[in-house]
Image (cartoon, helix red, strand yellow):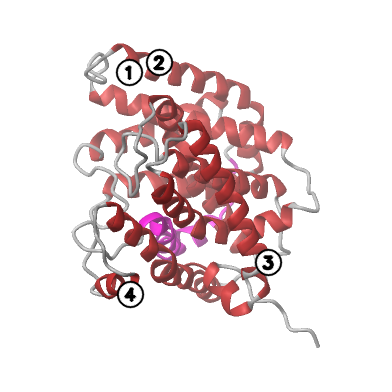
Amino acid sequence: MMQTKIRRYEFDWLRVLAFTLLVFFHTGMLFVSWEWHIKNNEISDGIEWPMIFLSQWRMPLIFLISGVGVYYALDFRSPRVFLQDRFRRILLPLLAGIFLVVAPQVYFERMAQGAEDHYFSFFMTFLEFEPYPDGNFSWHHLWFLTYILVYSVLLLPLLFVIKRRTFRFERTRGWMLLLLPGLWLGMGESLLKPLFPISGAFYNDWAAHYLYVSIFIFGFLIVSSARLQEKIRQTCRYSLALALIAVVLLYGLFWFSSTGWEYLGSTTYYYLVSINRWCWMMAILGFSLRYLKANTPYLRMLNELVYPFYILHQTVIVVLGYYIRDLSWPILTKFCFVAIFTFVSCFVLIRFVIMKVNFLRIPFGMKALKKER
């Protein structure tokens, strides 16, 4: 028998906040030295520092929230219905997004590199399906949809086993909750990251799979246990303290070492990064469980906006970046302009166009509107 659908507003808020960070992060990619699709004519070290911090835990946090979402989805869906929903809500937006949303990103990137083709000519090369970066075919920022779809399908038997069993975690202590998952993640990071740098290409991306599958399952387990959630809530201040110590140590060693992490050694560095990542996620989750319980009239709308917002936002940023990259504006002005315009334009397009039309809602991951009788 299926259970009554449960709504956890703290996780809804956390999902909205986590995806909102992507706009600021991808806006920042215009202005830092890391390889990306479009680059400003001036690079900023000041923007790079907070982005190093965000890059440690922003995507793992989204995979954690995804594990939570799958747990509640399995409360009221059979395996067959769950799989149908995954393909409809993830595969269709992925395919539509690749051809409608990602293709323009690649086009403007090629224009910035000196290409002069019209969009139709470029799109014919996109349809040759030669993988990016040698070719033009790519899923760019939509890699997340591929990963979460495959994880949800392949892990479904394990998730149902976990769902049917009762894990009490009676002997779990706060320090175990903070350190043991961090050490587990550090083991994978130290063994796999040197051999398989995270690429977003799915194939041969074993370090990423170890990290994201682990955190996806952790999210599923955490929400299955009221005791674990209470422990996370109780220890959130300790999580934050340990996270601050770890990040200060990481930044300090990086700041004073011109050759990177030579003082630590690579293995110790990977474990420290993983503990830092996990503690930040536990601190964010713990404070969310404490203080983000309230429902508001806007939360439902925001939660519905998040998915199409994620699909659209990077294309808006890339197009804006292309047109302002050579302007003489200060970097902060450009950053604010791109971020604000991205939020406003995506909101207007989704709220007043996409959400109104069923044949647009479904490719952007939203449920179809019910017809009035």
| Residue at position x 35%, y 61% in the image | 139
Labels 3, 2: front one: 3
Label located before the other in sequence (4 or 3): 4
The residue sitting at 26% across, 63% down in the picture is 116
Distance of label 4 from label 2 (alpha carbons): 51 Å
C-alpha span from label 4 to label 3? 28 Å
Taking the magenta stretch, the answer to whether it contains residue 163 is yes
Q: Amino acid at mark 3?
A: Phe
Badge 2: how crowded within 10 Å, few (<14), some, or many (20+)? some
Determine whether the residue tagged by mark 4 lies in a helix, strand or loop: helix
Query: How crowded is the residue under tag 3: few (<14 C-alpha within 10 Å), some, or many (20+)?
Result: few
Whether residue 23 is visible, yes or no, is yes
Separation of disc 3 and disc 1 at Cα?
A: 46 Å
Mark nearer the N terminus (1 vs 2): 2
User: Are the residues flagged by discs 4 and 2 in contact, CB closer than 8 Å?
Assistant: no
Query: What secondary structure is the magenta-colored segment mainly?
Result: helix
Which residue is labeled 2 in the image? 249
Q: Quadrant of the C terminus?
A: bottom right
Q: Quadrant of the N terminus?
A: bottom right
Badge count:
4
Q: CA distance from mark 1 to mark 2?
A: 8 Å
Q: Which residue is mark 4?
A: 120
Amino acid type, label 4: Phe
Query: Residue 195: where, in percent of width, then height?
Result: 19, 41
Residue at mark 3: 352
